[in-house]
Amino acid sequence: MSRKILIALVVAVLAAAGGAGWYFLEKPSQTADAGAGAAAANGNYVITARDMTIGDPKAPVVLIEYAAPICPHCAHFNADIFPEIRKAYIDTGKVFYVFRVFPLAAADGVAEKLARCLPKEKYFPFMDQLFRNQQQWDPEYGIQDVRGGLLKQAQLAGMSEDQFNACVASTKEDDAINQVAADGQSRYSITGTPALIVNGVAVSPGSVPSLDQMKGFLDSALASK
């Protein structure tokens, strides 16, 4: 997304009679990186126990994607580029993939909290569902009832409305969401999403790479090993 990032913002839902309010808590986290005790560091990246990943952790190349669920460019990467990258590089053991949410707006924080309230095996399917159905819940598409749209998506994933409300109202994920975003900004000076990091180096900043470009980045990293 080509606009300026809103960094280190946490989301909350205020349940009240007749509706809900969305607002930012503009208080960056001061806590240590979540899961740092189980972290594996290599070059300009750290992989933690909190990270959502696909593939072999021992793969020679690590691809980190910072994405925002509301971001149409991220949805394009998810639908049109990532499946081919997964088939050719991740599923073959060449690349270890790490996905991190980099919130641009309130709905991004809520989406991340909902995904983590689901069973772990549903995390990536739910994120894929959100990307593919942005027009049904995403404020980028002019949706006014964002809460209602996200509730519908959560219900499709098997979550009840009571579970939805409890998940979003919980603050236990807020510091970790902030810290992931702050670390991404500090390490890679992220200015848009998706931000793609190959073995600790930001590639294609400010634009979504084509499939051929993405393959080129990964092939180059593999060749250097």
Image: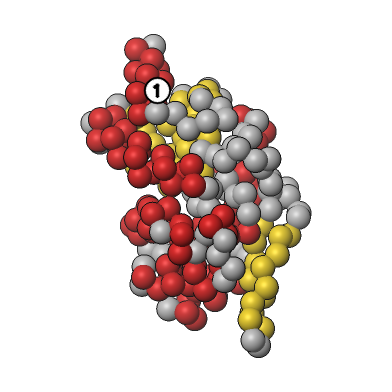
Which residue is more in the foreground, 142 or 110?
142
Q: Quick check: can you spot residue 171?
A: yes
Point 60% across, 63% down: residue: 172
Residue 102, percent from left and from top: 57, 45
Quadrant placement of the C terminus: top left
Residue at the extreme front of the image, as rendered: 142
Which residue is more in the foreground, 155 or 212?
212
**Label 1 crowding class (10 Å Cα cut-off): few <14, some 14-19, many 20+?**
few
Judged left or right of residue 12, residue 87 is: left
Three-letter code, disc 1: Gln
Point 35% across, 44% down: residue: 79
Quadrant placement of the N terminus: top right
Label tally: 1
**Residue on which disc 1 sits:** 213
Residue 100, percent from left and from top: 50, 44
Q: Is residue 179 above or below residue 143?
A: above
Residue 83, percent from left and from top: 30, 40
Q: Is residue 137 above or below residue 214?
A: below
Point 39% across, 37% down: residue: 97
Q: Quick check: can you spot residue 51?
A: no
Which residue is more in the foreground, 142 or 120?
142
Q: Is residue 44 above or below residue 52?
A: above
Q: Quadrant of residue 145?
A: bottom right
